[in-house]
């Protein structure tokens, strides 16, 4: 009885449509769509080639291919060929789109058994996020059996940013193509490269701002300390302060950067590039701020010192509570100018490999051979320098206007109210005859 049941099951299994996976995927490749290397980028048109070997007893009637989710496969750009050894076999087929990433191929005449089936999808767009991608699907054999097609070899697709996708779409626009036909506009103001450059240069802009914001407060402290040395009554302190200021102001910042970045490693001192950049900028700007503060302090009248000392303040209290607050107010425009100069000087650190705006722009320029990224970097510099320059002009005008802060056209202040004591004294005072006063004042030689 058991033998009969086993034989029946075996016959049933033989009679069922085969779901075997004899269709073997041999290759899944894509043509490089990069101008600089052999990379395959997502979000850009390429040609995807899929190949599978049928068994010696397999003849296909339909073939459905599922490309990676997010792909776009135009059905009218799909070409199917058969290869038998080195011989190319012409196939009779039709292609229809099931979804944007799925195509169904129907063979009007079943394929020859044992063929290598090659499917080429031109103008295919793989997912922009990229990754290790493969193609799967299913097939129907001539005998009606369904065959599942497993994932074949994977393609390494490089992810593409939103900016790159937008750039690719812009490059297809007619007005952009007409714009780029002008050599000057293409070399300095290419819209497709502007879109690519903005995210990268923006990142460098934030780093440059961070470098300046961290270094400028330190430079203010260094500048004040040097200023106190410069105005000190102790000769050796005054000499040391003057020596430092004269050396730093008398040598280029570019040379100081080279000494710090290439000299310190020779001494075995290795510091993070960004931290070393902040240190160099602080030490350099501190020397300039020293002279700014010294000029502001010396512009304060000596009467301020004398008045403060007469109130019982010592020299330190006079300096910190009377002189420095007034000096700071006077040097704010000059300090803002120094901040702008320090901000622009961050571009010098690109020469030693610090990734800031100019370095990011230079890397894109090296890839594209176009000067547009430098123009984008210049716009980011202006984004900070122009508003600060406007602020300096307004502040200087306010300092130069002596009437600023006084109300104009205001009402005349009312006389002070007399106290009861003052009223009593006034009433008890002798009365003066107004006619006598008038007559007396009119006499020759008299004064009213």
Image (cartoon, rainbow, N blue to C red):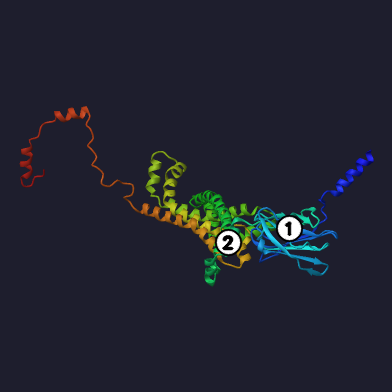
Give the side of residue 299 with respect to residue 203, left or right.
Answer: left
Circle 2 is placed at which residue position?
169
Total number of numbered labels? 2
| Tag 1 residue | 155
Looking at the image, residue 220 sits to the left or right of residue 447; the answer is right
Residue 391 on image: x %, y %: 43, 53
Kindly identify which numbered label has been placed on residue 33: none
Across and down, in percent, residue 30 comes to 72, 62
What is the CA distance from the residue labelled 1 to the residue labelled 2? 24 Å
Q: Earlier in the sequence, mark 1 or mark 2?
A: 1
Front-lying residue, 52 or 421: 52
| Residue at the (29%, 46%) spot, across then down | 407
User: Residue at 58% across / 67% down in the picture?
Assistant: 370
Q: Nearer the viewer, residue 142 or 312?
A: 142
**What residue is drawn where x is 17% and y is 27%?**
424
Whether residue 59 can be seen here: yes
Residue 310 x %, y %? 38, 40
Q: Quadrant of the C terminus?
A: top left
- Residue drawn at the location 94% of the way across and 41% of the way down: 3
Q: Element type at marker 2?
A: helix
Circle 1 Cα neighbour tier, 10 Å, few/some/many (<14 / 14–19 / ≥20): some
Residue contact between numbered discs 1 and 2, judged by CB atoms under 8 Å:
no
Q: Reply above or below: 443 against 247.
A: above
């Amino acid at each position: 009885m058991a033998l009969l049941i086993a034989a029946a099951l075996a016959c049933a299994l033989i009679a069922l449509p085969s779901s075997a996976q004899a269709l073997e995927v041999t290759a899944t490749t894509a043509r490089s769509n990069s101008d600089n290397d052999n990379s395959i980028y997502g979000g850009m048109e390429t040609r995807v080639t899929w190949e599978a070997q049928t068994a010696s007893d397999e003849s296909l009637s339909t073939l459905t291919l599922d490309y990676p989710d997010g792909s776009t496969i135009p059905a009218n750009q799909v070409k199917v060929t058969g290869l038998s050894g080195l011989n190319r076999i012409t196939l009779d087929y039709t292609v229809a789109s099931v979804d944007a990433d799925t195509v169904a191929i129907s063979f009007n005449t079943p394929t020859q058994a044992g063929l290598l089936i090659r499917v080429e999808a031109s103008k295919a767009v793989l997912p922009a996020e990229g990754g290790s991608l493969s193609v799967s699907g299913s097939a129907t054999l001539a005998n009606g059996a369904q065959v599942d097609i497993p994932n074949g070899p994977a393609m390494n697709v490089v992810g593409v940013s939103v900016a790159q996708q937008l750039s690719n779409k812009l490059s297809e626009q007619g007005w952009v193509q007409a714009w780029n036909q002008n050599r000057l506009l293409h070399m300095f103001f290419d819209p497709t490269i502007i879109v690519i450059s903005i995210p990268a240069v923006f990142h460098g802009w934030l780093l440059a701002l961070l470098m300046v914001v961290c270094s400028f407060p330190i430079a203010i402290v260094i500048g004040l300390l040097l200023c106190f040395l410069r105005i000190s009554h102790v000769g050796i302190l005054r000499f040391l302060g003057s020596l430092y200021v004269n050396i730093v102001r008398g040598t280029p910042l570019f040379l100081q950067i080279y000494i710090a970045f290439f000299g310190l490693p020779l001494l075995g001192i290795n510091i993070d590039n960004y931290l070393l950049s902040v240190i160099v900028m602080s030490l350099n700007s501190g020397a300039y701020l020293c002279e700014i503060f010294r000029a502001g302090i010396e512009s304060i009248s000596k009467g301020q010192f004398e008045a403060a000392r007469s109130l019982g303040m010592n020299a330190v209290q006079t300096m910190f509570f009377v002189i420095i607050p007034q000096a700071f107010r006077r040097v704010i425009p000059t300090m803002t100018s120094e901040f702008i100069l320090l901000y622009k000087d961050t571009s010098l650190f690109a020469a030693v490999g610090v990734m800031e705006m100019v370095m990011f722009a230079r890397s894109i320029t090296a890839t594209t051979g176009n000067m547009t990224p430098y123009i984008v970097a210049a716009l980011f510099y202006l984004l900070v320098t122009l508003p600060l320059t406007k602020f300096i002009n307004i502040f200087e005008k306010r300092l130069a206007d002596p009437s600023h802060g006084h109300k104009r056209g205001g009402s005349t202040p009312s006389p002070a109210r007399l106290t009861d004591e003052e009223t009593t004294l006034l009433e008890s005072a002798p009365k003066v005859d107004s006619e006598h006063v008038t007559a007396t004042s009119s006499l020759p030689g008299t004064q009213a």
